[in-house]
Amino acid sequence: MTKEEIKLNEVGDIDALIAYGNKCTYCGKKLNTANEEEIEYAKAIKRYFPVCSKTCEDELARYVENDKKHKKHFYTMFTACAFITLIGVLINKPIVSFIGVVIGGLSMVLYPYPITSFETFVNNPIKMTTRIVMIVGTIITLAGLAFIYLATSGKTVFDFA
Ligand SMILES: [Zn+2]
C-alpha cells in the first residue's frame, strides 16, 4: 500500500502509523526514497512498514502470523531452559544444565521469534534477524550437545587437543 492508499484506509495521524525507513523491512533491500509516494507499505499488527515487493509483503505477513502462533512456544522453551540449567547447578549435575542449554538453543532454531518490538526491523530486517537468531541457536545447541558428550564419555576438552 502506498501512503496515499493508507490515507484512504485510516483515520487520524497517518505519519504516526507509518514506520519510515529506507530499507525493506523484510529483506533489507535499499528502497528508492527519491519517489516517496511510490514506496509500498505492509501492515503489521497496527503499523505500516516499508517493503520492496509483493513477495516481501507476503513474507512479512507470514512472519507476523508465525510470531503470533509460536512466540509462546519460544518463551516456554526458553523458560524451561533457564529452570533446567539452574536446577543442574543447584543439584551439582552439569549434564542436567547442558540439557537445559540444548533446549535453549533449540528454542531459537525452531521458534526464532524473540523480538518483542516490531520497530526493531526498521533497522534490522526480518530476514537477517531471523537468520542470526537461528545461527546463534544452532551454535548453542551444538555446544550443549558437545558438553553432554564430554560429560557422559568421561573425556575432557583436553583429550581432543
Ligand atoms: Zn524486500
Image (cartoon, grey):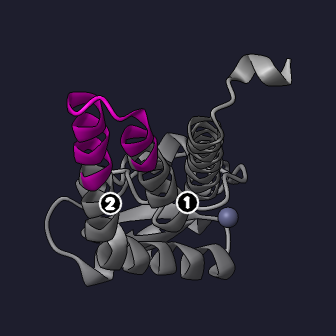
Question: Residue 85: horizontal and vertical position, in percent?
Answer: 32, 39
Compared with 152, 91 (above or below) is above
| Residue drawn at 27 percent across, 58 percent down | 75
Residue 75 drawn in magenta: no
Q: Residue furthest front?
A: 154
Mark 2 = which residue? 77
Residue at 28% x, 47% y is 84
- Residue annotated with mark 1: 109
Q: Main secondary structure of the magenta part?
A: helix
* Amino acid type at image mark 1: Val
**Of 46 and 138, which appears nearest the observer?**
138
State the extent of the magenta-drawn residues as a range.
80-99
| Magenta stretch: includes residue 91 | yes
Q: Is mark 1 within 8 Å of ligand 1?
A: no
Position of residue 71 in the picture relative to residue 26 (left or right):
left
Q: Quadrant location of ligand 1?
A: bottom right
Residue at 65% over, 57% down: 35
Q: Quadrant of the C terminus?
A: top right
Is 62 in front, or is 69? 69
How many numbered discs, if any? 2
Comparing 66 with 11, the one in front is 66
Query: Quick one: SS at disc 1?
Result: helix
Please tell me whether residue 86 is drawn above or below residue 76 in the rendered image. above
From the top left corner, tell me how far across and down residue 138 is, in percent.
Answer: 63, 50
Please indicate, yes or no, whether residue 79 appears anywhere in the rendered image: yes
Q: Is residue 62 left or right of residue 100?
A: right
Circle 1 Cα neighbour tier, 10 Å, few/some/many (<14 / 14–19 / ≥20):
many
Secondary structure found at label 2: helix
Q: Which residue does the image show at 24% across and 51% down from the upper left?
A: 79
Q: Earlier in the sequence, mark 1 or mark 2?
A: 2
Q: Is residue 1 visible?
A: no
The disc placed on residue 60 is none
